[in-house]
Structure formats: C-alpha cells, structure tokens
Image: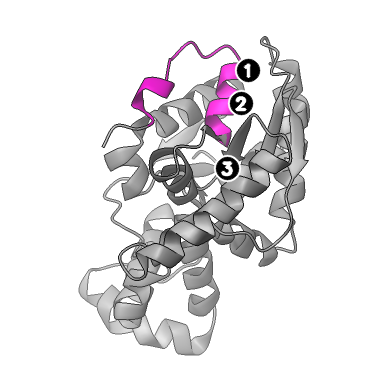
Amino acid sequence: MNEFVLYPGCLVQSRLPFLEAAARFIFEKLNVNVDDMEGFTCCMEPVGLRSLGPDTWRAVGARLHSIASERKILTICDGCSMSLSEAGAELSTDKGRDSVRDVMKEIGRDINVTEVVGILEFLHSRLDEIKKNMVAEIDFGLAVFPGCHCEAACKMKGLSASDMMSDIVRAAGGNPIQLRENLCCGGGLAGVDPELEKSVMHESISSAKNAGAFAVVTSCPFCFLQFDMVGRQTTLHITELVASGMGWQADTHRYHRTK
C-alpha cells in the first residue's frame, strides 16, 4: 500500500485539471507513488457549504477519511485540506464520532481518521529532492500568497504556510517576496458583496505589484482563480512553478483564463 492517496478536489478536476497534471508530473519526478482515491466526492467547501449543513459536512469527511484507510490524504486544494483536517479533528472526539456513527453504519464504513497533507506541506518536505531535479532557471520575484485556507490548515500543525512557500520558491530558483499578513483574495465574498470582494482583491494585487513581484504564486485554487481570472494578475500555482522548473513542457498559461 502506498503512503498517500490523492484527493484532487472537485474545483481542480472541473476547472483547473492542469494543476493535477502538474502535481502528477512532480510525483513522477520525485519517485513518489500515489494512489487515486476511488469514489471521492466534494469535501463540502469549508466556508459556504459547511455552514449550510454541518452534520452533512462531518459525515462527508468521515466517509473520505474512511476511504483513505491507513494512507495519508494528499490534497491539491487548500480548501479541501482545511475541510478534511478540521473534519478529522472533530471525528477524533467522542462527540464527533457519535454524530456520524449511524450514517457510517448505513453505508457500511468504519470510522477512522488519517492525516491530511496539503500539497504545500508535501513539497516542503522534499526541498532537497526538488533542488536536485531543477533543470530550468526561474530567476524572478514572486509574491508569496498561500491564502486563508492554506494558512488555517498549516496553523493546525504549527506550520507557517508563508515560510514554507518561500522555501519552495527558493528551491525552484525564484525570489520569494513575502507580503504583509492577513491579506485575502476576496473570493469568499463573491456573490455576497461584489464591491467589497473587488476592493479586498485589488488590495492584495496592489501589494504584490508595489513589492516588485513579477507574478503571484499560490497553493490555493480559489486564490488562483480570483487573482488570475478575475483580477487579471499573472498568477502561478505552486505545482506549476515546481513542475516547470523540473522540465515540464506543458504550456498551461493558455488555460489560465478559460471560463
């Protein structure tokens, strides 16, 4: 049995499949065997959908943890990482397990909790291997923007998402530019307060430009879409950056703003 089972998330598979392709290229280069998660469903996005049905969110998390069995869940989406990590924390309590016991019995699954590893954490754990596999120079400034979901998931483990992303950018040959804390892409306000959404987004984009960054690098697909498609700011996902440096020849930029 392999150590990891890949949970790409529905946003990546439906709108940004090239991010999954980049991740799989990296796995191959690093000689990491990753199982596919059979029968995976949406994690129930941790801000909007979760608040509409907490019991359903907890049951979905329990099912996905059960599918992973003894393997670690490796996520490409930080929203999924946050959602599944928080579900795992609740399911580790008696109250959390009791809340899903009937549902899990009905679908014939045991209740078990496994570790959730985000793509940023995974890459950071292999910095030396990434450096050894770099074949292309990436010599420009990149504004480091992990995003709220990534920061939240990392803080649960006592990790700094911004510091880890900066280390990965350096390993890829780039120049990381850390922005001030508590910046947001504004994506959570979409459809709720469009004017405030744009204001928050443009504050972050302006911060990156004023810092002299060539582009923004993020590990969050939500931030990626918000900056790249809505804000028209050149943006790279961390998997694209690392895969390109390793020799990935795919031209993903033509897909960035495909609606």
**Picture coordinates of residue 27, whole percent (x, y):** 54, 27
Disc 2, SS: helix
Residue farthest left in this picture = 106
Specify the label residue 12 is tagged with: none
- Kind of residue indicated by mark 2: Val
Q: Nearer the viewer, residue 140 or 58?
A: 140
Q: Nearer the viewer, residue 2 or 21?
A: 21
Q: Which residue is mark 2?
A: 242
Residue 85 appears left or right of 101:
right
User: Based on the displayed image, in which of its 4 quarters is residue 190 positioned?
Assistant: bottom left
Task: Name the residue: 69% across, 65% down.
Answer: 155
Disc 3, SS: strand
Query: Of marks 3 and 2, which one's residue comes earlier in the chain?
Result: 3
- Kind of residue indicated by mark 1: Gly
Residue 96 in view (yes/no) = yes
**Picture coordinates of residue 259, whole percent (x, y):** 26, 37
Q: Nearer the viewer, residue 204 or 153?
A: 204
Q: Nearer the viewer, mark 1 or mark 3?
A: 3
The answer to whether marks 2 and 1 mark residues whose Cβ atoms lie closer than 8 Å is yes
Task: Name the residue: 49% across, 40% down.
Answer: 1
Give the magenta part as a residue range. Answer: 238-256
- Color encoding of the figure: one colour
Residue 81 in view (yes/no) = no
- Kind of residue indicated by mark 3: Thr
Specify the label residue 245 is tagged with: 1
The answer to whether marks 3 and 2 mark residues whose Cβ atoms lie closer than 8 Å is no
Task: Name the residue: 70% across, 42% down.
Answer: 210
Residue 8 appears left or right of 158:
left
Q: Which residue is mark 3?
A: 218
**Badge 2: how crowded within 10 Å, few (<14), some, or many (20+)?**
many
